[in-house]
Image (cartoon, rainbow, N blue to C red):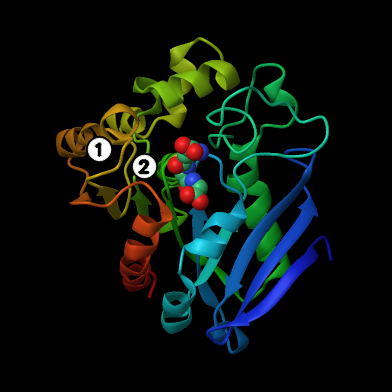
Amino acid sequence: MALKVVSEALSHGGRQLVLSHDSAATATPMTFSLFLPPQAEQGRVPLVTYLSGLTCTHANVTDKGEYRRSCAELGLAFLAPDTSPRGEGVADADGWDIGLGAGFYVDATETPWSANYRMWSYVTDELPTLVEAEFPMLDMGAQAITGHSMGGHGALTVALRHPDRFRSVSAFAPIVAPSQVPWGEKAFTAYLGADRDAWRAHDAVALIESGARLPALKVDVGGADSFLERELKPELLEQACIAAGQPLELAIRPGYDHSYHFVSTFLPDHLAWHAERLR
Ligand SMILES: N[C@@H](CCC(=O)N[C@@H](CS)C(=O)NCC(=O)O)C(=O)O
């Protein structure tokens, strides 16, 4: 098997796995977590992929996301990759918003990042191909995607560019227009270069403006999120969706911040919403 089992534990009757493998996309070892609900012992189950935010590994949502009870009840598998390549020789920079833990789900074209920072290929191609081959109980015809912050950006852009792969898409506090905010401008300049035209393929608002559409879209943002006005700007997504006729269920949750206390509060709602569309 191409996968090494890092850990395995029974939870809510399902199997919480942490796995690692040598990635061809990033040319590094990569670690991810996969929860298989009890229903996976009997037959095929839908797959929800969760992309994490800045500074995270697979472990943040695995430890703090509180998704297992819902996934076990709803019969959903839950896949959580890392957010960047890691290891000896992998480029990094000062600051937590670029480099390790901040891959932004793009294939970098600029040095030194292009050697390993190929998270687009990893999450859209290598990882789904790998889990499909290794876990035949996953129904790859019934997939949903979600994510948090930088991972919300990842979920939106991956789904907008693979409209036939996902039946539903959701996000928590996503960076909806990275080309227009400091986090995205910094990362895209480093990874993709100064030509802003190249950024459009990785900008959810720009993709919607260019005609890309999603089957079903749900977004929650905390009203007390300290990144709301500077980095997240959900109003840009709302305006783009209205102009494009793209249905969007957007909720600003008063009092909630950017943390996993917010994500874990609303992740069960998102999973139930995805399950309805994956049935
Ligand atoms: N590391 C930054 C915060 C970055 C941050 O809020 N990251 C979010 C995603 S954008 C996160 O999930 N952090 C990890 C965690 O809360 O477990 C800081 O210390 O101010």
Q: How many marks?
A: 2
Residue annotated with mark 1: 234
Expressed as whole percent of the image width and height from the top left, the position of residue 206 reads 34, 27
Q: Residue visible at 40% across and 27% down?
A: 178
Residue 20 lies in quadrant: bottom right
Q: Residue reaching furthest top?
A: 194
| Res. 75 mark | none
From where the camera sits, is residue 13 visible? Answer: yes
**248 over 141 or under it: above or below:** above
Q: Provide residue 99's location: percent of width, then percent of height.
A: 63, 29
Query: Of the residues shown, which amino acid type is indicated by label 2?
Result: Pro
Q: Quadrant of the N terminus?
A: bottom right
Give the structural element (helix, strand or loop) at label 1: helix
Alpha-carbon span between mark 2 and mark 1: 8 Å
The reply, left or right, for residue 123 in relation to residue 182 is right
Identify the residue at image location x=56%, y=13%. Answer: 193
Seen in the image, is 50 located left or right of residue 256?
right
**Helix, strand or loop at disc 2?**
loop
Residue sitting nearer the eye, 263 or 170: 263
Pointer 2: residues within 10 angstroms few (<14), some, or many (20+)? many
Q: Residue at x 36, y 31 (%)?
A: 207
Q: Is residue 94 left or right of residue 275?
A: right
- Horizontal and vertical percent position of residue 71: 46, 75
Give the residue number, with chain letter if any, for mark 2: 174
